[in-house]
Image (cartoon, rainbow, N blue to C red):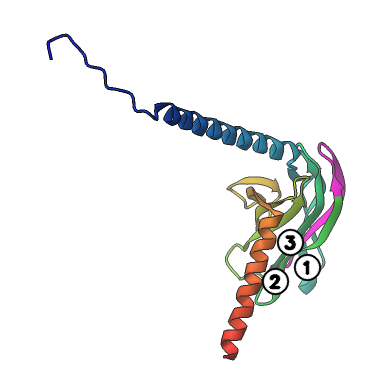
Amino acid sequence: MSAGIIRRMPMPENAAAIWSAIAASFAALSSLLILRVQRRSLLASVRPELVLVGWSRSRRGEGERKHDVIAFREVKNVGRGPALHVVINCLQLVNNRPTAVLNTARLPILANNESVEISGEIVIAWKNVVSSPDKALGITIQIYAWDLADIRHETLYQLIATETPGSIDFGDEIAPGVALGSRTTNNKAVWLLKSRARFEWIAGIRRILNKRN
């Protein structure tokens, strides 16, 4: 071959089919990405976001019946979608004795950008908390809500309270001697929760049968 002459490789007979398959693959990938973006946009448009506001702390009772009450007075939905079947709960035990108790509160629906007043009182029994120079107690408040897309949202409020008000020197203080450690939300589809519960039920039955055998 003389210098300066470039020999072109012959195109395979199925070149058109190859390029057609490549184009179809890119089109399918683009469609998949568009569907994912649309689904995320839909989920974001119906997602509720519940927050507790109006925190306070008081002390009640005398002697052995003395206890603290950490309270919030309002639940707000600052999300973009309504919250359905709202459940707010807190129950903590040490050696089968309660340390933090909140009577379960239920709301059938809370529309977005709306709030409702609620008597959310967490009773703290310091006598059941393990003794230390300055008693401190971690408190977890669970908030469950469902959205219009049948997604369950679990919000956890992690609080830290000290027996002596005013001794908090960490975190964001929301009431005397009470700090907000963190607030997180997990989202799970209802069908996934049902499938997991079904698998756990089957696994439990198998364990019982294996023990009998």
Q: Quadrant of the C terminus?
A: bottom right
Provide the residue span drawn in magenta.
109-128
Task: Verify CB contact (< 8 Å) between mark 1 and mark 2.
Answer: yes
Nearer the N terminus, badge 1 or badge 2?
Answer: 1
Which sits in the foreground, 179 or 182? 182
Determine the CA span between mark 2 and mark 3. Answer: 18 Å
196 to the left or right of 98: left
Vertical arrangement, residue 48 with respect to residue 99, above or below: above
Residue 94 highlighted magenta (yes or no)? no
Q: Secondary structure at mark 2?
A: helix
Question: Height in image: 72 above or below 16?
Answer: below
Residue nearest the viewer, comparing 75 with 11: 11
The kind of residue on which mark 1 rests is: Lys
Distance, label 3 to label 1, CA atoms, is 20 Å
Q: What residue is rendered at 63% in x and 36% in y? A: 35
* Residue 67 visible within the image: yes
Residue placed under numbered mark 1 in the picture: 66
Residue position for label 3? 90
Which residue in the structure is indicated by mark 2?
Answer: 127
Q: Position of residue 109 (x, y in %)?
A: 86, 48
Whether residue 164 is visible to the viewer of this picture, yes or no, is no
